[in-house]
Amino acid sequence: MSTAQVAAVDLGATSGRVVVGTVGSDTAGRDVLRLDVVTRFPNEPCRLWNGSRAALHTDVPGLFGHVRRGLADAARDADNLVSVGVDSWAVDYGLMRGGRLVGLPHHYRDERSQRGVELVESVVDRAELFARNGLQFLPFTTVYQLAVDRTDGLLEPADRVLLVPDLVSYWLTGREVAERTNASTTGIFGTDGVLDDVLLDLLGIDRSLFPDVVDPGEVLGPILPGVVDGDPSVSVTAVGSHDTASAVAAVPMDPDSAVYISCGTWGLVGAETSSPVVNSRVRDAGFTNEAGVDGRNRLLHNVMGLWLLSESVREWSRADGAAVDLPEMLAAAAHCPAPTHVFDAEDPMFLPRGDMPTRIAAWYSDRGLAVPSSRVEMVRAIVESLAVAFSAAVYDAAELAGIDVRRIHVVGGGAQNSLLCRILADRSGLDVLAGPVEATALGNVLVQARTHGLISGDLTRLRHTVATTFPPVRHEPASSRRAASL
């Protein structure tokens, strides 16, 4: 057997983890692909008073402390750790001066973003901005955050902007880069992947703030001495540093006949294309074009995702003074009648942190509709509403990408939600293939492993390895189940 290990640092919107992937081949020449979670840790944003209001920030230095400890444990326990790769959520960034972080990064759910939309749209309208960057309108996109920082004078002391995964990689290696898949989510790059100097000039933002772009698979350098206890001799490798890019790389799909849903805090519903698709139909449907691994394009739409459930559970746990068991509630919701009406899971009113059940109840009551009368009914309404939103986005993605969709692949945490997968199959009339749950870590691991010669092949080969090692669970629509019973 010939194997080695790589470590995936995966920072999500609500939690992070360090995962070790063992990759190689056994004595019979068969692929070996195994994941072991070394550590998990929370990612809880904090509010800090800035003189006029309590702004929402991300404690990236605190996250980096967890990363360091996780990598030290990984290096101690692994037989042959050769590489580390970092992925995270998109759009947020740290401002740097002389290699040092200038304050905690703002969190994308901070209320300042709407002011950024107004600032940007005062110099370039939304249609033109889409024509330039091909991105779905989301009020927290990096370009809007940068516009606020520029107006507030926060860019003046900065000499570099580093997106969250690039910031973590910088602290590990001392090298400043912008990894392409995450850079493509910022709104300041054109559809050709090149920094949009004209847009930056319109916004009064200096292009020198942004480092050179690198592609997934580039070795950034060794971990600096003393950064990780034990001083492991390990390289840091660029991966699809936008967590969705890594997840999509590990979806065991045929891009010509499948649509994927990377389902976690957000539900990213999309198709894989060879190049950006930029036209009025894509813009009006609220779809975005983001860079993928191996030069692929991710044509996708952001749906609110499991955020609706996690925020509801957080509110109920706060009210009860004890943790609420979500799996138990989902099991009960499976026996609960479907609601007469679903709510709009994409309504912006559900974007901020706070009391989600009250906001959902308000959505119903404002329209004269019956409000779910219990927590279990609320959970069922959330799952049904997400399934409807996902199903609509699946067919939009297929039409815009020009594919004949035959199945839906659900990866990430949502793959464990069998109720959601079953209702999605029923609502869409398509087979739903659930898994792998750890798609993001797998995509991160596979790109590193290929770079270091532990596995070979294109995305098709990598996805085949995922499919054989982590076979998905099939959920058939009710129509197929009924036909099979006749």
Image (cartoon, helix red, strand yellow):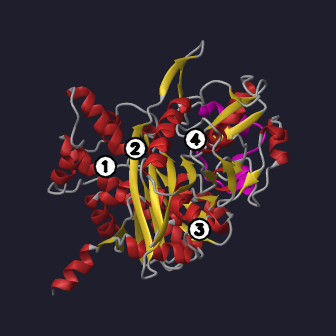
Picture layout, residue 295 above or below residue 236? below
Whether residue 270 is visible: no
Q: Quadrant of residue 448?
A: bottom right
Q: Which residues are magenta?
A: 113-138
> Crowdedness of circle 1 by 10 Å Cα count: few (<14), some, many (20+)?
many
Within-10-Å neighbours for mark 2: few <14, some 14–19, many 20+: some
Q: Is residue 94 magenta?
A: no
| Disc marking residue 382 | 1
Q: Earlier in the sequence, mark 4 or mark 3?
A: 4
Q: Which residue is mark 2?
A: 39
Residue beneath disc 3 = 450
Q: Earlier in the sequence, mark 2 or mark 1?
A: 2
Q: Which residue is mark 4?
A: 231
What amino acid type should be assigned to the residue bearing mark 4? Asp
**Which amino acid lies under the numbered mark 3 shown in the image of this protein?**
Arg
| Residue 254 position within the rendered picture, expressed as x and y whole percent measured from the top left | 50, 78
> Which marked residue is nearer to the observer: mark 1 or mark 4?
4
Q: Earlier in the sequence, mark 1 or mark 4?
A: 4
User: Which quarter of the rendered picture does the N terminus lie within?
Assistant: bottom left
User: Which mark lies nearer to you, 4 or 2?
Assistant: 4
Quarter holding the C terminus is bottom left
